[in-house]
Image (spheres, helix red, strand yellow):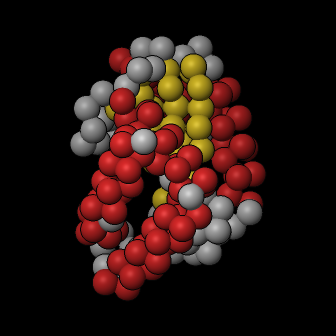
Amino acid sequence: MPRKVELLPHDSTWADKYQEEAHSLTTVLSPEIIAIHHIGSTAIPDIFAKPIIDILIEVKEINRIDHYNNLMATLGYAAHGEYGIPERRYFSKDKEGTHTYHVHIFQIGNPEIDRHIKFRDHLITHPDDAQAYSLLKIELAKIFPEDVDQYTEAKSDFIQSVSEKINST
């Protein structure tokens, strides 16, 4: 069943929620973690976002993460394996049936790490692009209010164009 698209104005507590969750995740995954990052729209000031904190974790060896599924479950996370992205481990956490956290785990050196971080950093340092992204998200939420997958897919051209801009500089 498709999930509903809910966008909210930037909430300054998202950074605190990330910090608290990063601490909990570090407690469970500390033997594997190289670095942990707040990514996604909740990490970008002044733009609309789905109120889901996206966390990217860089680890030493991706295949060892599968052994942590039960420990992640103690934090309320469901394991989804690669979930469409090779060499990733994806976990989601829900509160009352609504996603609250997404954790994306990649082995150090995976190009997805760089892609996510560069996109976030670009939008933070280029407010015009960030606002264009925010306005696009608002329009797409009107078009796909009941289907987060379609909403996400519809953002891909914008994300690709920003990525090309980043890589050309």
Image position of 62 with respect to 128: above or below: above
Of residue 137 and residue 60, the one placed in the foreground of this image is 137
Of residue 62 and residue 95, the one placed in the foreground of this image is 62
Quadrant of the image containing the N terminus = bottom left
Task: Specify whether residue 86 is in view.
Answer: yes
> Where residue 128 sits: x, y (%)?
54, 68
Quadrant of the rendered image containing residue 62: top left
Of residue 98 and residue 168, the one placed in the foreground of this image is 168
Tell me the residue at 44%/34% (across/down). Answer: 114
Left or right, 98 with respect to 47, comes to left
> Where residue 2 sits: x, y (%)?
29, 69
Tell me the residue at 42%/42% (across/down). Answer: 169
Count of numbered circles on the image = 0
> Where residue 122 sits: x, y (%)?
52, 50
The residue sitting at the front extreme is 169
> Where residue 90 sits: x, y (%)?
39, 39
Tell me the residue at 27%/61% (across/down). Answer: 157
The residue sitting at the bottom extreme is 142
Tell me the residue at 59%/64% (across/down). Answer: 127
Left or right, 72 with respect to 80, comes to right
Image position of 88 with respect to 92: above or below: above
Of residue 116 and residue 152, the one placed in the foreground of this image is 116
Task: Specify whether residue 100 is in view.
Answer: no
Quadrant of the rendered image containing residue 113: top left
